[in-house]
Amino acid sequence: MKEITLKEIEQLNTGSYEIIDIRDEAARDYGMIPGAIAISFDEEGQDPEEKINEIPGDKKLIFYCDFGRKTRDLLYDRDFLAKRDCYSLEGGYTGYVTSKISEFGDVLAKREKAEKSIQKKYHRQLFAPFAKACKTYKLIEEGDHIAVCISGGKDSMLMAKLFQEIQKHKHCNFELTFLCMDPGYNKENRALIESNAKALGIPLTIFESEIFNAVDTIEKSPCYICARMRRGYLYSKAKELGCNKIALGHHYDDVIETILMGMLHGGQIQTMMPKLHSTNFEGMELIRPLYLVRESDICTWRDYNDLHFLQCACHFTDTCSTCHEDGTTSSKRLETKKLIARLKEDNPFVEANIFKSVENVNVDRVITYKKNGKKFNFLDEYCGED
């Protein structure tokens, strides 16, 4: 398939082409090129040929994926595309995002707008639940040195800004190090992270590892192994820098999806905890200060400030959407997200109820439960009550 650049597209008449996003739904949730339509070639229940045929035959079809690799091969075994004037967007969505970063213009104005939107417009949706989680679960304590782990995505970048904001309130004394690991990013993705951090006023401490190369040859669960390795490297570097905590950007939606996936796919009831003691790094804790923040509000803040972040910058980006340490695939998480959305149509409280379910566990009505690695059965104390 022929390649076309963004500059070349800008020179075309608006009505002479159609931009088509072929990424999966999980990837599209992170953002799309304005005006693009979504046509998946991999998702079940979708007929790409039917959708393509709905587009007038005289229009140029400009396809994009994450980096441009999949769209370049799209014509193979696709007779209905061979008859059309098709192009692959050079660099894919990542190339588009990178180009937007280069158009930042007044960086100081961009930063001030992002910070003011946290203080004013989205204070109730973002800062208030962030501060509530920190207070409720005692995530920030006197004398802490917290490594705020920056992956380059919307969640971790917002988390960094919220930490900067809460530090201004001086309720307790604590230090921050904004820690970013480069596990083998290509130069475009690393430049994107650095540009976003600069625009938002986040002073990054970047260190490198060879994780991507290490997992390239792993066929079974590469994302699971990659996530585990990344966390280990982050703990190690944070401890080396004198930190006693690492902060990750998991939000409320991650929590309720994890609860439901554990039941449906793991046969267990457990949750993603707001904080954990490290079992391998003595004296270290993991905290999740976005625990009560909704993903939709994060996306709204991102779009209001015209920010463009990485979704996933690994070597598997064209075949997976996100890295989950619990071993679940992005398709399973997306499936669970859709299930919750469908349930919410009939019960608007379903999300809160899923979250509260692990706060209201009645062990008198549980057949078996575990505590400190030991299993307990209701028969152990059964006395025959009705």
Image (tube, helix red, strand yellow):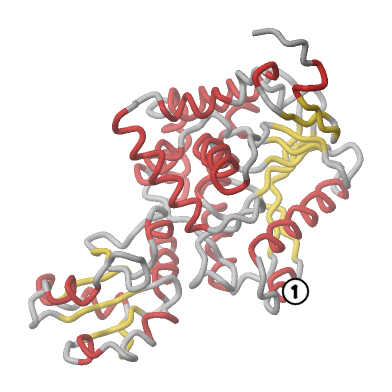
* Residue 75 figure quarter: bottom left
Q: Which residue is mark 1?
A: 214
Q: Residue at x 52, y 36 (%)?
A: 256
Q: As rendered, which of 4 and 235 lies closer to the eye? A: 235
Where in the figure is residue 275, as x and y percent of width and height?
72, 32
Q: Secondary structure at mark 1?
A: helix
Q: Quadrant of the C terminus?
A: top right
Q: Residue furthest front?
A: 384
Where in the figure is residue 306, as x and y percent of width and height?
36, 49
Q: Residue at x 13, y 76 (%)?
A: 53
* Residue 229 figure quarter: bottom right
Q: Residue at x 80, y 54 (%)?
A: 232
Q: How many marks?
A: 1
Q: Residue furthest right?
A: 282
Q: Residue at x 84, y 39 (%)?
A: 284
Q: Residue furthest top?
A: 385
Where in the figure is residue 340, as x and y percent of width and height?
41, 39
Identify whether 210 is placed above or below 167. below
Amino acid type assigned to the residue bearing label 1 in the image: Ala
* Residue 5 figure quarter: bottom left
Neighbor class of circle 1 (other Cα within 10 Å; few <14, some 14-19, many 20+) is: some
Left-right relation of 152 to 126: right
Identify whether 149 is placed above or below 230. above
Left-right relation of 102 to 188: left
Identify whether 325 is placed above or below 270. below
Where in the figure is residue 204, as x and y percent of width and height?
67, 52
Q: Quadrant of the N terminus?
A: bottom left
